Structures are given as C-alpha cells and as structure tokens.
Image (cartoon, rainbow, N blue to C red):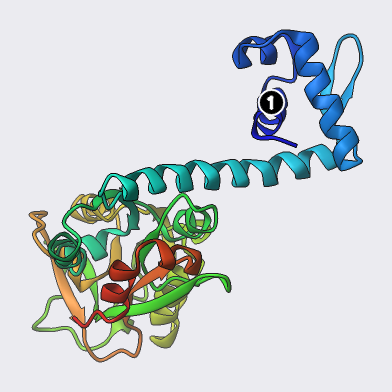
Amino acid sequence: MNIQQLKSVVVLSEKLNFTRAATELNIVQPALSRQIKQLEIEIGAVLFKRDKRNVELTAAGHYFVKEIKKLLSGLERATKQTTNIHNGHAGEIKIGFTHSVMQTILPDILKKIHLQTPGIKAVLKEMNNRDQYLALQKNELDIGFATNPLVPFNLKSKVLHTDNFVVLLPENHPVNNNNYTSFSAFANEEFIFPSVADGPNYVHILESICMDAGFTPKIIHETDSASTSFRLVEAGLGISLEPASSLSGHEFPVKSIELKDIKQKAKLTMMWNPEREPEYPLLFTLLKNWKN
C-alpha cells in the first residue's frame, strides 16, 4: 500500500469513472485499474462495484475512503508543518469564532499570539457552534471560540470570559431601562433566535431565560448572524437576546437592557483538539493559562 494508491482510491470515489479518474491522476486507465485491484487484494476487501457501465463504492469502500481522506489530510498538514519548522517558520493556525468572541477577547488573544509567536499566521473564520465542532473533529480548525458550546467528548475546552445577556429592543419599544422590572414583561413578544441545529445548547439557554420568567418564547425568525439579528430588531420584527459583548462597537439604532440578575450567562469558551497541542506547545500553554 502506498500514497499513490490511496490518492487513486479517493479520486475514483469522486469521479466514479475509471477514464476520468485516470485523466485527473495523469496515468493510463489500465494502470489505475491495477492499483485499485492490488489495493483491494492487500486489504482483503472489495472497494468498488464495477461493470461495463457503472462504478460504485461498496459499504467497505465508503468507510475506507472516509478514513483515508482523514489520513491524507493529516499527512498533508504534517508535511507542510514539517517544512515550516525546517525553514524556521511557525506555520499557521486556523481559528473559528462566534461574533461575541471577536467583540471581546479574541483581538487581545491574537495580539498575545503575535507577540509570543510572531511567525505564526492566524487564519480566522466566523462560524456557528455546530460548524466549529465538526471542523475541530476533522482537523480543519486548530482552535474554536464559541458561546455556550456543548463540547464533544473528544475535544477539550476552557471558559475564557463570562458575559451578561442583554435583551435588544426597537428604539420605540415601551420597555426601557427605567421601567424594566422583570423579563416576564416580554411574555407576549415575538423573538429572534439562532437556529437550534447550529447551536442547541446556546438556544436552550436562551429559552430557559424565558421559561424562568414564566413563558415559552414565540420565535418568528431564526438567524446565526448577530448583525442580522440587530437589523431585524431595528426594523421592529422582533426582539432578541445577545451576549452584552455583541454590542461592542455596533451602530444599530436599537436599545438594550442588560440582564444582570438572571442566572444564565454567556460563557465565551475556547475549544480545541488535544492532538494539536504538540504542534504548538507555546501557543496552547498561553491559551490554557489565559486570564481575562
């Protein structure tokens, strides 16, 4: 078994056509057929069903290709990182984050990273909680920063900052900081929430704020973008709950009431795959010891 055979399996699984796969691999079709056959004999499993017209992955083939893609991705990453180390470069680190994290702790974290490991390149991507979980588990991200995540068992996590929630209201809403008494005042309001699929634990916490006030929220819009939520509130299309830090630097004409006396808090949390720690020991030491 060699790398070329594994790459050939992946390409054939995508093309499901020997001629097109051979063309992409820049080899002749008989050579590709021999590679696949030799590999199947070596591992003792049929990976592809084929006849004169069709090529399909077997159940064993689906599993093998999924695992091989992970292996090849890891090999590519290891090769690139090894080259960077050899050339005296720190390489790059891929970071996922939610809006409120960027508004609070992430800029300071990036400054510290730059000071302590100046050669490192940070690749940043705003992502919801669910997409961060998946990307971390696939090694497509090195570190994720999420709000109240439900952290998978194979990832590590640390709460870096705790924030109060605020309720966002249109400017002409009758409730304000002077006459607000309890969250039950919003029992008949229409709410703008994130989608459950993209952050179930976060949404559960928002719902519990309403439930503790004695009502079930009527959700009329769903969005995972804080900016979109602000715009919808501004337009009078509902009210929303956000971490207080999400308001930092915003210029939307909406008003907010900070919910200081409720038990629910926005916990800005770092997540990472422990397999990544040996690659960036100084960086992970910095982050794990972070105090805001």
In the image, is 225 to the left or to the right of 249?
right
Q: Look at the numbered disc 1 and give the secondary structure of its residue.
A: helix
Residue drawn at x 40%, y 61% is 279
In the image, is 223 to the left or to the right of 255?
right
User: In which quarter of the view is residue 250 placed?
Assistant: bottom left
Residue linked to disc 1: 8
Q: Is residue 46 visible?
A: no
User: In which quarter of the view is residue 171 placed?
Assistant: bottom left
* Residue 150, horizontal then vertical, whole percent: 50, 72
Depicted 89 relative to depicted 164: above or below: above
- In this figure, what is the number of numbered marks? 1
- Mark 1 neighbour class, 10 Å CA radius: few under 14, some 14 to 19, many 20 or more: many
Depicted 7 relative to depicted 23: above or below: below
Residue drawn at x 49%, y 53% is 139
199, 260: nearer the viewer: 199
Residue furthest out toward the front: 86
User: In which quarter of the view is residue 5 placed?
Assistant: top right
Q: Is residue 221 visible?
A: yes
* Residue 82, horizontal then vertical, whole percent: 40, 48
41, 178: nearer the viewer: 41
Depicted 202 relative to depicted 143: above or below: below
* Residue 78, horizontal then vertical, whole percent: 47, 48
Residue drawn at x 8%, y 59% is 249
* Residue 69, horizontal then vertical, whole percent: 62, 41
In the image, is 66 to the left or to the right of 100?
right
Q: Quadrant of the C terminus?
A: bottom left
For badge 1, the amino acid type reads Ser
Q: Quadrant of the N terminus?
A: top right
118, 99: nearer the viewer: 118
Residue drawn at x 69%, y 13% is 22
